[in-house]
Amino acid sequence: MTNPLYETLLGRHAESQAPFLYPEGGEPISYAAFLAMASRMSNAITSLGLMPGDRVAAQIDKSPEALALYAACVQGGFVFLPLNTAYTPAELGYFLSDSGAKLVVATDATEAKVAPLVSGTGAVVETLNADVTGSLAALAARQAHQAPVAERGPDDLAALLYTSGTTGRSKGAMLSQNNLLSNALTLARAWRFTQADVLLHALPIFHTHGLFVATNVILAAGGAMILFGKFDVDALVREMPKASTLMGVPTFYTRLLDHPGFGSGLTRGMRLFISGSAPLLAETHIRFEERTGHRILERYGMTETNMNTSNPYEGERRAGTVGLPLPGVELKITDPATGANVPRGGVGVIEVRGPNVFLGYWQMPEKTREELREDGFFITGDLARMDEDGYVTIIGRGKDLIISGGFNVYPKEVESLLDEQPGVAESAVIGVPHPDLGEVAVGILARAKGQEPDLDQIAAAMDEALARFKRPRKLIIVDELPRNTMGKVQKNILRQRYGGVLTA
Ligand code: MCA
Ligand code: AMP
């Protein structure tokens, strides 16, 4: 095969009139029509002078065309770099320059702010709006609906996804054709996806969950998706009788449980509910089963690895666990200090190896060496234990990370900004429990001697610099931060002290 990802997930459907997408409020789109859209888009990108291997960055709203842009990149051999629509220009500039993107796809609404970020670099900026307008949409409309398929091997780069780090700059995780393809085929099989499936797709498509897990699994199975622009619990409930499966973050499930119309009558036609990206509380799992008779299937993954473990389709879906290593994925629990295996039942860091594990961080060989061992095991930074029968329970994170509604917030990034503010001596950002989003960020500011931080001005500085989901929901001013004898800020004490500030 010249381009296994394209041929296995996309090309083989080129003649199929079966439905692929049911866009919310729009006409169904068949596989053949979707692939024609992708081909036109691929021709359009080629006409802009891009070559296979060039990066295509996209910060655009979710739509069938946005998905076709991803498919076009697979077809033309371009490296797809999706970006969270919440990122501010201040955040975006780094991703665009670090990746050396040759094409940046923005929207008509954001173009004026995005274009200056790449001026002088030779990158082209085009626009694609959710209503099929924009310069790239217009260019694609003038292209032939068939396009060459670029030759790409299993280890060639298919996508670059930036993940923030606990220290330093964001890192671009390099995902190969085979990383994506192997995981899509494994998951489709493990979760018994077929042509008959209709997935409720309400996740964003700029992250692994909505893009690779959801979309690639449906493509692998030849099923269809009801494509929502964003998560809206009423819309989900309305469409559920037409669907068979849902993939979501835990917030989807808590919001469904809070919906007055939600219950077993609505879920009768559904065969599978899958949760991931953040811990699903055992209580949510149990309440969901009581209400609907369905046991949510929880799985665990990372941007760098795609999916690693899953509760079984057949067999026990154990609440509070992320299940068993997926076929082809080796998983071990090691001592973070020595790297040695810990005995079964003991707590350590999860390490994984398999065709799903990424190639390394873009242009960061040292960071790659720190996290990806020479023998192929990737050190996830998640703390867990594995039971005698192989079930994995995540019990915490070795990395300082807050997962809010499925989005990652790295405290270090927010603290760096807070520390710069007038009147602030230093800061600590902690995750506190939140009934809707699981946890959210709260900032603790130690005032500089004799000064009082101006919270309005700090909020304005954060507006400018940070995506809204990263912003602390509350800022608390204190005289000083608690430290241990080594001088390290004791976040556990802050969590105990302020853990109830949003729920009290
Ligand atoms: C929105 N806001 C948030 C979040 N989302 N704040 C904190 N955390 C969030 N996740 C803020 C907005 O900025 C806004 O703030 C206010 O909340 C309301 O925004 P709205 O758009 O109405 O929110 P929503 O539509 O209700 O969004 C909540 C959501 C969404 C549906 C849970 O965040 C979501 O779709 N999350 C999924 C994330 C995901 O796909 N993660 C997968 C990563 P303001 O009022 O100040 O403007 S991939 C991954 O983790 C790995 C690989 C894996 O295992 O899957
Ligand atoms: P990301 O860096 O966005 O890929 O997020 C990956 C992180 O999400 C993992 O390292 C875990 O900490 C977390 N994660 C994903 N799925 C689960 C899950 N089912 N339970 C607990 N944490 C999860």
Image (tube, rainbow, N blue to C red):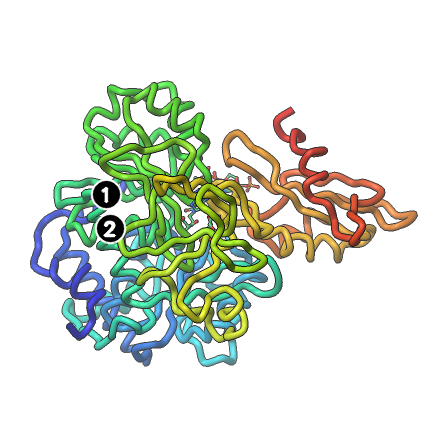
Q: Nearer the viewer, residue 418 or 138?
A: 418
Q: Which residue is mark 2?
A: 217
Between 180 and 269, the one nearer to me in the picture: 180
Locate residue 143, reporting x and y percent. Answer: 20, 70
Residue 267 visible: yes
User: In front of the other: label 2 or label 1?
Assistant: 1
Does ligand 1 reach within 8 Å of label 2's beta carbon? no
Residue that label 1 marks: 191
Residue type at tag 2: Val
Residue neighbourhood size for the residue with mark 1, other residues' Cα within 10 Å, grouped as few (<14), some (14–19), many (≥20): some
The quadrant holding residue 303 is bottom left
Report x, y in % for residue 258.
42, 23
The quarter in which the N terminus is drawn is bottom left
Instruction: Check whether the beta carbons of the residues at disc 2 and disc 1 lie within 8 A of each other.
Output: yes
Instruction: Give the numbered dot on residue 233.
Output: none
Distance (Cα) linking label 2 and label 1: 9 Å
Coordinates of residue 203 in the picture (x, y in percent): 36, 44
Q: Is residue 145 above or below residue 347?
A: below
Q: Residue furthest right?
A: 450
Quarter location, residue 253: top left
What is the three-letter code of the residue carrying label 1? Trp
Number of other residues with Cα within 10 Å of mark 2, as a class: few under 14, some 14 to 19, many 20 or more: many
Left/right placement of residue 426 relative to residue 232 reads right
User: Where the C terminus falls, by quadrant?
Assistant: top right
Res. 468 in view? no
Q: Is residue 203 left or right of residue 91?
A: left
Q: Residue 163 location, x and y as percent? A: 49, 59
Q: Residue at x 24, y 53 (%)?
A: 186
Q: Residue at x 22, y 36 (%)?
A: 314
